[in-house]
């Protein structure tokens, strides 16, 4: 296995890990600051987490010129 292949996989997994941690922290911060509780907290936290996760991955793709899931492949 070439080192370039290993490097790509390491960047892939580190990028996803960073996106998970950032999205979780930001979603929890926003929901906690808003003072939500119960089922509303669960639903809003899930929606925020998903939006932030994919948004962070998209920004990382553009800034670092790497490809996670090919978000820009279908766009002209």
Image (tube, rainbow, N blue to C red):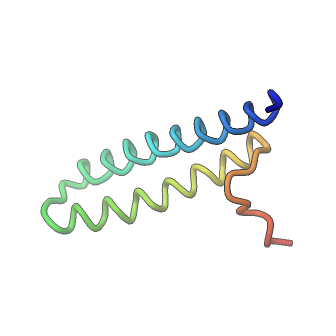
Instruction: Name the residue rendered at 51%, 39% in the picture.
Output: 17
Q: Height in image: 42 above or below 35? A: below
Q: Height in image: 50 above or below 75? A: above
Residue 73, position as x, y percentages in the image = 80, 66
Q: Find the residue positioned furthest to the top.
A: 3
Asked if residue 6 lies left or right of residue 56, the reply is right
Q: Find the residue positioned furthest to the left.
A: 38
Quarter location, residue 63? top right
The quadrant of the rendering that contains the C terminus is bottom right
Residue 39, position as x, y percentages in the image = 17, 68
Q: Height in image: 51 above or below 16? A: below
Instruction: Name the residue rendered at 71%, 63% in the picture.
Output: 71
Residue 38, position as x, y percentages in the image = 13, 63
Q: Nearer the viewer, residue 21 or 40?
A: 21
Asked if residue 29 lies left or right of residue 66, the reply is left
The quadrant of the rendering that contains the N terminus is top right
Q: Find the residue positioned furthest to the right.
A: 76
Instruction: Name the residue rendered at 18%, 54% in the picture.
Output: 35
Q: Nearer the viewer, residue 22 or 16?
A: 16
Instruction: Name the residue rendered at 73%, 60% in the picture.
Output: 70
Q: Nearer the viewer, residue 41 or 73?
A: 73
């Amino acid at each position: 296995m070439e080192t370039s292949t290993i490097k790509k996989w390491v960047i892939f997994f580190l990028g996803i890990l960073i996106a998970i941690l950032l999205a979780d922290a930001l979603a929890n911060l926003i929901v906690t600051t808003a003072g939500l509780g119960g089922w509303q907290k669960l639903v809003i936290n899930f929606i925020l987490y998903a939006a932030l996760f994919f948004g962070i991955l998209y920004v990382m793709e553009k800034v670092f010129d790497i490809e996670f899931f090919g978000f820009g492949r279908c766009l002209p």
